[in-house]
């Protein structure tokens, strides 16, 4: 990471979480050079399936704090 990018990162990290999230999404979107329509449709189907599973009570949601704790344990 060059000096300008490091400075930009430091400034971005000072933003409120919602602004950092929006910025991160925009940066990630900028990395897509093209849209694979088949992949987009597949993701739309997968998302709809997962939402239905949540709505129907087929899956149990895990709070982010628990997921984070588990990931930290795995890394050790």
Image: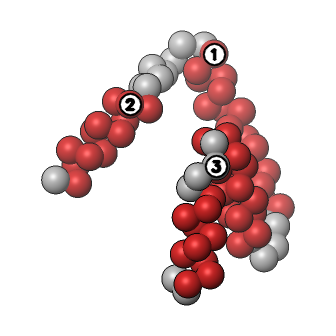
To which residue does mark 2 refer? 65
Local SS, label 1 = helix
Mark 1 or mark 2: whose residue is earlier in sequence = 1
Which residue is at 37% across, 36% downward?
Answer: 67
Image position, residue 74 (x, y; %): 22, 49
Is residue 48 at least partly visible in the picture?
Answer: yes
Q: Position of residue 50 (x, y in %)?
A: 61, 31
Identify whether 41 is placed above or below 60.
below
Q: In this view, does 38 lie to the left or right of 57?
A: right
| Disc 1 from disc 3: Cα separation | 33 Å
Which numbered disc, 2 or 3, marks the residue closer to the eye?
3
- Residue, disc 3: 15
**What mark, if any, has residue 55 been given in the picture?**
1
- Residue at image location 58% in from the left, 73% down from the top: 7
Residue 19's tag is none
What secondary structure is marked by label 3? loop
Return the x and y of residue 35 as percentages of the image width and height: 82, 67
Q: Quadrant of residue 57?
A: top right
Q: In this view, does 67 lie to the left or right of 13?
A: left
Is 45 drawn above or below residue 30 in the view shown? Answer: above
In the image, which is nearer the foreground, mark 1 or mark 2? 2
Which class describes the residues within 10 Å of circle 1: few (<14), some (14-19), or many (20+)? few
Nearer-the-camera pick, 51 or 13:
13
Task: Give the residue at the far bottom of this rendering.
Answer: 2
């Amino acid at each position: 990471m060059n000096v300008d990018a490091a400075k930009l990162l430091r400034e971005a990290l000072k933003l409120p979480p919602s602004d950092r999230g929006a910025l991160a999404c925009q940066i990630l979107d900028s990395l897509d050079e093209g849209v694979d329509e088949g992949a987009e449709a597949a993701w739309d189907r997968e998302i709809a399936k997962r939402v239905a599973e949540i709505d129907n009570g087929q899956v149990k949601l895990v709070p982010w704090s628990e997921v984070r704790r588990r990931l930290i344990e795995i890394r050790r």
